[in-house]
Image (cartoon, rainbow, N blue to C red):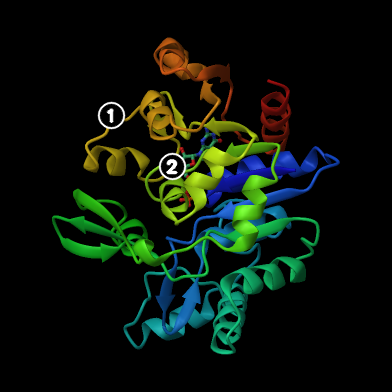
């Protein structure tokens, strides 16, 4: 059994390769939900949806989020009322958020809701698990004030200067039984190339997760989301700096040092290998840039062989 932890796009790219290997083992994916936001009364789980849309072959291949062939008529109509015009919600995508919110109002947990959405997208064999059934949200303190992470990312285009990051509600977040079981029963645990502060970070902060990973007898591998010392997309560098951290794969390894056996770094960062090995972590240098599905398959195959 393989259990992966991840956020949205970086994780989805890697996992699309991993599932194409058609391994004869169950794959569990524990997904960050700290990116979640309520827009116009609808609860949106961007990372969960990116994983489901990508792995089911429905993601918009240019944007790498949202659904292929979607339109934005409802969003245009909403902007008339001056609300949330900045958050890109496609018309077909809205159906997912309506369904999620509807099921929540009926008392279903995020774990149950995610399973239903994944199944309806044909992902019956995968076990996609939200990191927690509790509401958690990442907020960013900037020189333009405090804002939800999505507002910083989408509306403000990552331009404000980040002062600090805080995960609202994380202190009350507990891991579900399924999350803990998937960690304890795994023979391999993979930390996908996802943002260490706002994707992997929140998952590890959910009560019970880090301890379960430490306890698990699985081989634990982390893939750095930095290539040539910078993220391929997103604000990992800005957020790491705001937390007073060096922006490097070595620093990413240090964040997971208490439990990982192996760190995968990109060939562009090969000069860091010795520093990471000194932390007592086996370090493997690979081409980690996934430009297409063949790259993702190749990377997944090599990682499982190391
Ligand atoms: P989200 O998609 O914004 O939720 O963000 P994630 O937490 O999934 O991660 C985005 C991170 O994925 C960024 O730091 C990227 O550098 C990293 N990433 C995206 N594509 C790749 C890739 O092909 N290779 C590697 N090594 N990292 C990647």
**Label 1: how many Cα within 10 Å (few below 14, some 14–19, many 20+):** some
Where does label 1 land, which residue? 246
Q: Please, what secondary structure does the residue beneath circle 2 have? A: loop
Q: Determine the residue positioned at 41% across, 26% down.
A: 249
Left or right, 97 with respect to 127, comes to left
> Which of 46 and 246 lies nearest the eye of the viewer?
246
Q: Please, what secondary structure does the residue beneath circle 1 have? A: loop
Is ligand 1 less than 8 Å from the beta carbon at label 2? yes
Q: Determine the residue positioned at 50% across, 56% down.
A: 32
> Which of 164 and 289 lies nearest the eye of the viewer?
164
Residue 105 x %, y %: 54, 88
Does residue 77 lie above or below 245 as drawn? below
> Which of 203 and 76 lies nearest the eye of the viewer?
203
Residue 264 x %, y %: 55, 25
Q: Determine the residue positioned at 58% across, 58% down.
A: 50
Where does label 2 land, which residue? 233
């Amino acid at each position: 059994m393989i259990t992966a932890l991840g956020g949205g796009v970086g994780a989805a790219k890697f996992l699309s390769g991993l599932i194409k290997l058609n391994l004869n083992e169950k794959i569990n994916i524990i997904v960050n939900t700290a990116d979640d936001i309520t827009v116009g009364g609808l609860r949106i789980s961007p990372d969960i949806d990116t994983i489901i849309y990508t792995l089911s072959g429905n993601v918009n291949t240019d944007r790498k989020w949202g659904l292929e062939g979607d339109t934005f008529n409802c969003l245009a109509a909403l902007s008339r009322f001056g609300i949330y015009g900045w958050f890109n919600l496609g018309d077909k995508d809205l159906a997912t958020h309506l369904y999620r919110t509807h099921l929540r109002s009926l008392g279903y947990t995020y774990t149950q809701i995610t399973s239903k959405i994944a199944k309806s997208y044909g992902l019956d064999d995968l076990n996609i698990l939200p990191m927690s059934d509790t509401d958690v949200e990442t907020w960013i303190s900037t020189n333009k004030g405090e804002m939800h992470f999505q507002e910083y990312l989408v509306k403000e285009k990552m331009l404000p200067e980040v002062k600090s990051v805080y995960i609202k509600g994380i202190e009350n977040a507990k891991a579900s039984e399924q999350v803990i079981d998937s960690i304890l029963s795994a023979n391999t645990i993979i930390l996908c190339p996802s943002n260490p502060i706002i994707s992997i970070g929140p998952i590890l902060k959910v009560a019970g997760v880090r301890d379960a990973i430490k306890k698990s007898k699985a081989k634990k591998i982390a893939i750095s989301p930095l290539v040539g010392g910078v993220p391929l997309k997103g604000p990992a560098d800005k957020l790491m700096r705001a937390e007073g951290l060096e922006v490097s794969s070595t620093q990413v390894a240090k964040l997971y040092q208490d439990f990982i056996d192996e760190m995968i770094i990109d060939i562009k960062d090969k000069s860091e290998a010795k520093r990471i090995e000194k932390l007592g972590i086996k370090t493997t240098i690979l081409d980690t840039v996934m430009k297409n599905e063949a790259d993702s398959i190749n990377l997944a195959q090599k990682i499982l062989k190391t």
